[in-house]
Each structure stands twice: as structure tokens, then as C-alpha cells.
Image: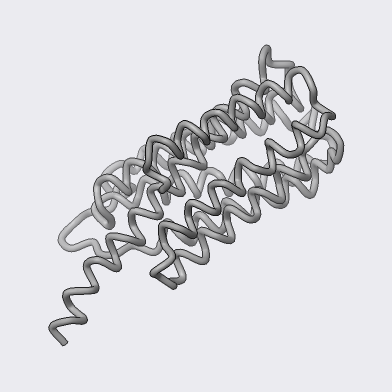
Amino acid sequence: MIGSLWFRAYYLFLVILVITCQLYFPESLAHTISKSLLMSSLLLALLVDTRSYSTILKWSTVLAVLLSLAGDILLLPTVDNFLFGLLSFLLVHVVYIFCFLRLDSRPLAVPFIRRHPWSIFLMILFGGWMFLQLRNGAGELAWAILIYIIAIAVMTLTAFNREAGVGKSSYRYVAWGALFFVISDSVLAWDRFAHSVDSSSLWIIGTYGIAQLLIVTGLVKQIQERNQAAAPEAAIN
């Protein structure tokens, strides 16, 4: 379901609808419904595609999508509870980190971070620069922003460190999804605490929608591949 052309077309339509409502009808019922449908649809696709499985990875992914739905609602203009929205998405990243650490195997493979230690330096450099740019505008929320920056940096690094521990398709989906999440959160934070970004809703919602679709698709593939690999072993035993 999640990999089908019709679902992706429907999901893209929802993303465009949310962007349109955010730009022109921010306090409308249509905005509330469309934004709620975005993660709800992704959750339904996840449950349908993994209906035959019951694993920690599956239910952790479900939790991440539910927390994302809560965060989306909390950040609606009609609710505008930024602190709790920030907390929801902080928990999303923590759950995704947990998911990304649940690797199938890594036989004779060297993790991405060990082969590319500069990636840690790059994330620290970018995260530190972002914090310095945002801290004055964030005021009392500066500490929360710092914690969030650390969380998304760790999430991105663990996404890339899945290399050779999962199937290539799953790895690429999740790695690209993590990068799009960084873009979305960076633009949102910059627009709110530093300088206004032209067409910010287009960048924030567009990259966020793509990020979530890519990450969940990658995790669904991992769940399916893991259980397909386990089936022959169970039959032999």
C-alpha cells in the first residue's frame, strides 16, 4: 500500500492541500482536517502493510507516527502550542533513533560513522551554528532548542549508520528521509526564531511530508524483509 502509486499520489495531494491551507486558510477546518489526515493516512498504510507482523520495530514506528500526528495538531495555528509540539517531535526523533538502532545484521561490515567520522564533526558544526543563530530569538526556549538539535543530529547519524545492517532500499529511504527532516526542522526554527523565510510553509510542510513518507517506507521495508528472512528459518526448524 505505502509503495503503491495511488497512495503516493493521494499523499502528495494531502501535502499540497496542507501547504495551501497553511498559506491561505491557516485557521480553517480544512487545514485541521488535511493536516490530521497526513499522518493518519501514513499510519493506516503502515498498519496495512505490516498487518501480518507484530514486532518491536513495527510498534515503535507506529508510536513515532502517532507522536508526529500529535505534534502536527499542537502546531496548528488554532492550537499554537509550540512547546508541547516541540516536545512531541523531540519524542518522535527519540523513537526513530530507537528504530534505526534495531538492525537486522552487520556481518563483516564497518558502520557508516566509523568509516566517515567527519560526519559527526559536520553535524556538530551545523548544530552549533544553528543554535548560535537561534538562541537569542528563542529566549527561554533556547535550552529546549539545544536539546532538540542534539536529538535530530543523533537521529540523522543513526539513520546513516544503518548502512549494511538493512536492505539497500530500506537504507536509502530512511537516510534520505532523515535529511529531509533536518531541512524541514531547520527552516521551521529559522523562520520562527531567526529571520522570516519566504514561502516557509512550502518548505516546512513539503520536506516534512516527504521525510515522513520516506522514513516510514524504509522501516516498513525493513520489517517485511526481516520477517521474510525469518520465515524459511522457521520452516527448517
Residue shown at 59%/25% (left/top)? 16
Q: State left or right for residue 234 relative to residue 150.
A: left
Residue 17: x and y in percent read 64, 26
* Furthest residue in direction bottom, as rendered: 237
Residue 104: x and y in percent read 29, 64
* Furthest residue in direction top, as rendered: 198
Q: State left or right for residue 220 relative to residue 164.
A: right
Residue 90: x and y in percent read 65, 50
Q: Quadrant of the C terminus?
A: bottom left
Nearer the observer, 73 or 47: 47
Q: State left or right for residue 168 relative to residue 41.
A: left
Residue shown at 41%/62% (left/top)? 50
Residue 70: x and y in percent read 71, 51
- Quarter-wise, where is residue 24 in the image? top right
Nearer the observer, 20 or 106: 20
Residue shown at 25%/66% (left/top)? 228
Depicted 60 relative to depicted 15: above or below: below
